[in-house]
Image (cartoon, helix red, strand yellow):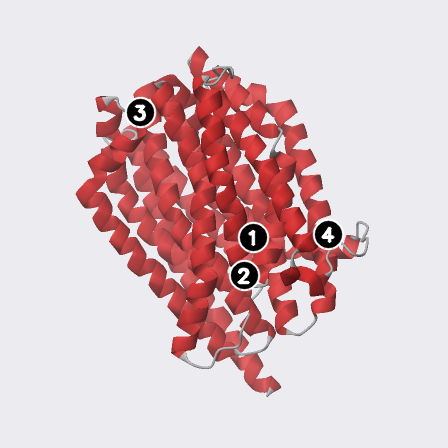
C-alpha cells in the first residue's frame, strides 16, 4: 500500500487495488454462473433445483462471510497506524471464527434443510436436486469460510493480485468438475444439478489450501509471520471481529437474503418462471461483482487513509470509487437494453425461458444502478469502521420497504412475478439514498476530528 499525493496517483492506486479484486469476484461469481448454466442445459428441473439451492446458500455464504471480511478494515487501519505486529493475531482469530461459523451452518442445515424444502411445495425432481445440491455443498463450507478470512487479510495488504491468481485457478477446475459430474463424463456418475454442488465443494478445498500455503510461505507475507506463533481462541479478538463484522455481515445478509426470499416466493409459480427468474438474477449477480469489488477496494483504501488520519485523501477515494461504479452501471444498462435476448440465451435453450428471462433483465437495469451507489458507499463506511447504521438502513430499505412492496404488487396487481422485481428496485433505491446521507455525516465528523488532532 502506497501513500498518494495527487488525484492521478489515487486513480492509479485505485485501479491497482480494484482490478484484481474485480477479477477475483467475477471468478467466484462465475462458479455459481456455471453451476446454474450447466445445470440449466442439463434440464429445466435441474436449473430450478439448483436455483433453489443457490438461493438458500447465497445469503448464508455472503452474510457470514461479511463477518470475516472485518479482517480487511482492521488490518488496513493497523497498517495505516504502523502497527504491523498485531496483524497475525487478528488473522488467526478470524480463522478460528471461520471454523465456528462453518460448524454452526452445517448443524443448522442438518436440522432445518428438510423442513424448509418440504414447506415450499416443489416438484419432486426440483426438491431432490435442491436438497442434494446443498448436502454436497456442505462438505466445502469449512474451506470456504477459511479462504474468506485469508483472502480478506491478503487484500488488506494491497496484495489483491495474489487473491486474483488463487481464485483464477479455481474456475477451470470448477467447470471441468461440473462437466464430469453433471453430465457423467469419463466414467463419472451422471448427477445432474447435484453434480455442480459436489464440484463446487471440491473447488473450495483447492482454493483454501492454495491460499494457506501462499500466506505461510509467500515472501509478501513474511514480515507478518501469520503462522509462526500459535494464537489460541481469544475473547478479545473475537469481540473485535464480531463488533465490526456482525453489522457488516447482517447488512450483506439483508441485501442478499431479500433476493433469496423473492426466489423462494417465486416457487409458487411454475418451473419456467423459477428458471427464468434465476437466470436473470444470476446475470444481475454477475454485474453486481463490479460495485462489490469497488466496495472492497474502497474499504482497503479508505481504511488505510482513515488509520493514518488523512480525511481529504479518504474522501477523494470515496468520490473516485462511487463515481466509477455509477458510470459502469450505466454502461451495463446499455448492454442489457441492446443484447438482453442474447444474454437470456446463455442460460437456456427453451424459448419460453429465454423470453421471460429477457423481460426480467429489463427490471435488472434499474436495481443495478442503485446497487452502484449503495454498495460502494457501504465500502467507504466500512473503511471508517462505521458499520452499525448501515445494518439498520439496509434492513429497513430491503425488508420493511422493498419486500412488502414486491409482495403486494406480485399478489394483487397484473405484474405477477415481475412485481417482486419492482419491490427490489424500490428497496435498493431507498437504501442508496439513505446510505449516501449517512456517509456525508461520517465524513464530516471524521474531518472535524482530524482537524482537532492537527
- Tell me the distance, in whole angstroms, between the alpha carbons under discs 3 and 1: 32 Å
In the displayed orientation, state which residue is furthest to the bottom: 454
Of the numbered discs 2 and 4, the one sitting upstream in the chain is 4
Q: Please name which of the two marks, 4 or 3, marks the residue nearer to the observer.
A: 4
- Give the numbered dot on residue 382: 2
Q: Earlier in the sequence, mark 1 or mark 2?
A: 1
Pointer 1 with pointer 2, Cβ within 8 A: yes
**Residue located 73% across and 52% down the image:** 93
Where's residue 154, x and y in %? 59, 57
| Residue at image location 34% in from the left, 23% down from the top | 41
For mark 1, what is the residue? Answer: 248
Residue at the (63%, 39%) spot, across then down: 143
Secondary structure of the residue carrying numbered label 3 = helix
Which of the 4 quarters of the picture holds residue 104? top right
> Dot 2 surroundings within 10 Å: few (below 14), some, or many (20 or more)?
many
User: CB under 8 Å between callouts 3 and 1?
Assistant: no
Q: Earlier in the sequence, mark 3 or mark 2?
A: 3
Q: Mark 4 sits on what residue?
A: 93
Query: Looking at the rendered structure, which numbered label has been put on residue 273?
Result: 3
SS for callout 2: helix
Count of numbered circles on the image: 4
Above or below residue 99? Residue 22 is below
Q: Residues within 10 Å of mark 1 (few under 14, many from 20)?
A: many
Q: Quadrant of residue 110?
A: top right
Q: Nearer the viewer, residue 304 or 179?
A: 179
Amino acid at each position: 500500500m502506497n501513500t498518494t499525493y495527487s488525484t492521478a496517483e489515487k486513480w492509479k492506486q485505485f485501479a491497482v487495488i480494484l482490478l484484481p479484486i474485480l477479477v477475483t469476484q467475477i471468478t467466484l461469481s462465475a462458479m455459481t454462473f456455471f453451476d446454474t448454466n450447466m445445470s440449466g442445459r442439463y434440464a429445466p428441473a435441474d436449473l430450478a433445483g439448483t436455483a433453489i439451492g443457490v438461493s438458500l446458500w447465497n445469503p448464508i455464504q455472503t452474510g457470514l462471510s461479511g463477518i470475516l471480511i472485518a479482517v480487511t478494515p482492521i488490518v488496513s487501519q493497523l497498517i495505516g497506524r504502523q502497527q504491523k505486529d498485531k496483524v497475525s493475531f487478528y488473522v488467526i482469530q478470524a480463522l478460528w471464527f471461520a471454523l465456528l461459523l462453518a460448524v454452526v451452518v452445517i448443524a443448522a442445515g442438518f436440522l432445518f434443510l428438510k423442513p424448509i424444502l418440504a414447506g415450499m411445495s416443489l416438484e419432486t425432481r426440483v426438491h431432490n436436486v435442491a436438497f442434494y445440491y446443498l448436502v454436497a455443498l456442505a462438505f466445502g463450507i469449512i474451506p470456504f469460510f477459511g479462504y474468506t478470512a485469508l483472502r480478506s487479510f491478503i487484500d488488506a495488504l494491497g496484495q489483491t493480485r495474489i487473491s486474483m491468481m488463487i481464485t483464477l485457478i479455481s474456475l477451470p477446475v470448477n467447470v471441468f468438475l461440473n462437466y464430469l459430474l453433471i453430465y457423467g463424463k469419463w466414467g463419472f456418475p451422471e448427477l445432474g444439478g447435484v453434480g455442480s454442488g459436489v464440484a463446487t465443494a471440491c473447488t473450495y478445498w483447492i482454493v483454501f489450501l492454495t491460499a494457506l500455503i501462499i500466506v505461510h510461505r509467500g515472501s509478501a507475507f513474511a514480515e507478518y509471520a501469520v503462522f509462526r506463533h500459535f494464537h489460541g481462541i481469544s475473547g478479545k479478538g473475537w469481540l473485535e471481529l464480531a463488533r465490526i463484522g456482525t453489522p457488516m455481515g447482517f447488512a450483506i445478509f439483508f441485501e442478499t437474503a431479500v433476493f433469496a426470499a423473492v426466489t423462494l416466493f417465486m416457487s409458487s409459480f411454475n418451473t419456467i418462471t423459477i428458471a427464468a427468474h434465476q437466470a436473470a438474477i444470476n446475470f444481475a449477480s454477475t454485474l453486481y461483482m463490479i460495485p462489490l469489488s469497488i466496495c472492497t477496494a474502497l474499504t482497503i483504501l479508505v481504511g488505510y487513509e482513515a488509520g493514518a488520519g488523512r480525511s481529504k485523501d479518504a474522501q477523494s477515494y470515496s468520490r473516485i470509487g462511487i463515481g466509477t461504479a455509477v458510470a459502469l452501471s450505466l454502461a451495463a444498462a446499455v448492454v442489457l437494453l441492446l443484447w438482453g435476448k442474447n444474454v437470456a440465451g446463455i442460460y437456456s435453450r427453451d424459448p419460453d425461458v429465454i423470453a421471460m428471462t429477457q423481460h426480467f433483465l429489463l427490471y435488472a437495469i434499474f436495481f443495478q444502478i442503485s446497487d452502484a451507489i449503495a454498495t460502494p458507499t457501504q465500502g467507504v463506511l466500512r473503511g471508517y469502521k462505521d458499520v452499525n447504521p448501515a445494518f439498520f438502513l439496509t434492513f429497513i430499505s430491503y425488508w420493511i420497504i422493498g419486500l412488502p412492496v414486491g409482495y403486494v404488487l406480485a399478489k394483487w396487481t397484473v405484474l405477477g412475478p415481475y412485481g417482486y422485481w419492482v419491490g427490489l428496485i424500490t428497496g435498493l433505491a431507498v437504501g442508496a439514498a439513505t446510505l449516501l446521507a449517512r456517509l456525508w455525516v461520517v465524513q464530516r465528523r471524521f474531518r472535524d476530528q482530524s482537524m482537532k488532532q492537527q
